[in-house]
Amino acid sequence: MLVESRLDPEAAVVNEVCAAGEPWMKEIRKGQIFRILDLEGNQAVDTLFYNAHDTEERYSAIDTIQRQRNLYLGVGTRLISTEGNAMLTIIADNCGRHDTLGGACAQESNTIRYALNKRFMHACRDNFMCAIQHDYRHGMSKRDITHNINFFMNVPVTPAGGLTFEDGISAPGKYVEMRAEMDVMCLISNCPQLNNPCNAYNPTPIRLLIWDQQSA
Amino acid sequence: MLEATARAPAGPVLWEETLPGGAHWSGVMRRGTALRFTDIEGGANLSALFWNFEEKSERYNMPDTLKAQHTAFLTRGHCGFSDMGRVLFSIVEDTAGWNDTICGVIDDATMTARFGKKRFQEHRNDMHRSGREGLLKEMGRWGLGKRDLHANVNFFSKVTTDADGNLSLCAATRPRAYVDVRFDMDVLLAITAAPHPLTEMGVYVPKPVKLTAWRAGIAPADDYCRNSRSENQRAFVNTARYFAD
């Protein structure tokens, strides 16, 4: 389901560009609206959310899938935590489908998927490691890097159980917008994967916007 | 579906144990051992998590496992990959045919909503036990906690999807279906025979699962799982390097 946003970027309290292959970490308070904008199209935005006050509670791909009995994320999806709480709700989306099965790329998984000598290419795991190594507030480690959301990625599953990364359905200007249902910390890796045709082998920047709570 | 006529394990049986429905267990499965999970009555679900026993931050990774093998479920020929690019386990036989790994484990709130609450005080060991609590209790024995609870495998449970991504839990497996899992590293295994999280509302009757351990040996060069895809071959190379084979 496609739902357009009526929010004005001029009124956003955060409006930043995250370059391709970079991490991004920021707190989003309950009631704030968070938008991820795909500036050039088909960019994978590997995203994790944590309870800002207790990072042991974090986004859970399996609980989100289980609660909505559906694989894909879109308008109306509640992003569910490991404790079964709604963390954010997707309220606008002009892309149509987002993945949470495909995980993040890592040096190690690249050696399996592509070739052993791909180990030394930049990958999302390094962005996540970099972000948490420099974050002294939350004391996180690799144990805290869980199964993420891939905004703008198209990973269809067939009735027979096949799974593939298809070419993206996103395009320049596509965005997804969600309302925080609790204070959350967002951790993004703007994916640097150069081995997968789903992003045309061309990682690109994204824009991240946050609005304060909207009056009805 | 294959007829569930059990072939004997190809190696000396080390031990056997029956896990009652709803119960949980954990233990170290050494490299080259294997476990047969047998759905004795039919309709069992066995939720399982896997770690490298030597370095427990290395664990089964559902997304890496699925995307490397281009599958949304696990069966014979598939391997379970760790987040470090190694093979934790291989499914060397499977008469159930489909093992879910995308739906997670049932928690207390979902259990109570579907089946009602039964405490120990009134019901003794017929109390209701959720899979999540069972796994956490086992994980606590090894110094692990909620931060280590990730996507699990639900052996014996088949969950299919339609074109829009809607999920359906399919009919139960037949009695005596079994899945043989070979451990390709020293693996800390935690399991619970609690119901699958998509089990519809009704009576809480989780089914028992028999565990049969045997010495299978390290995957040979012509191993079916090793050679089922080039991705798996590379993962076995990574694993061999770790063990200095």
Image: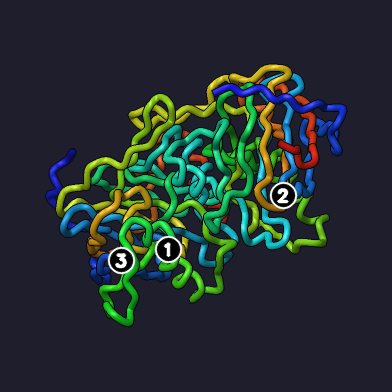
Q: Is residue B111 above or below residue A66?
A: below
Residue at the front extreme of this rendering: A216
Q: Residue at x 69, y 59 (%)?
A: A141
Amino acid identity at mark 1: Asp
Question: In which quadrant of the rendered view does residue A123 lie?
Answer: top right
Closer to the eye: label 3 or 1:
1
The one of A111 and B98 positioned closer to us in this rendering: B98
Report whether mark 2 lies on the same chain as mark 1. Answer: no
Query: Element under label 1?
Result: helix
Label 2 sits on a secondary structure element that is: loop
Query: Which residue position holds label 3?
Result: B22
* Residue found at x 84% / y 31%: A17
Which amino acid type is shown beneath numbered disc 2? Lys
Residue A30's disc number? 2
Q: Is residue B5 visible?
A: yes
Q: Does residue A122 appear in this view?
A: no
> Image quarter for residue A5?
top right
Check disc 1 and report the residue beneath it: B108
**How far is mark 2 from mark 1, CA to CA?**
26 Å
Inspect the image, locate mark 3, and give the three-letter code of the amino acid beneath it: Gly
Q: Residues within 10 Å of mark 1 (few under 14, many from 20)?
A: some
Q: Is residue B67 left or right of residue B219?
A: right
Colour scheme of this structure image? rainbow
Residue A89 in the image: above or below residue A7: below
Judged by depth in the image, the label closer to the viewer, 2 or 1, is 2
Which mark is nearer the camera, 2 or 3? 2
User: Residue at left 73%, top 24%?
Assistant: A6
Locate residue B77, reporting x and y percent: 35, 41
How many angstroms separate mark 3 from mark 1 (CA)? Answer: 12 Å
Left or right: residue B54 versus residue B107 is right
Q: Quadrant of the N terminus of chain B?
A: top left
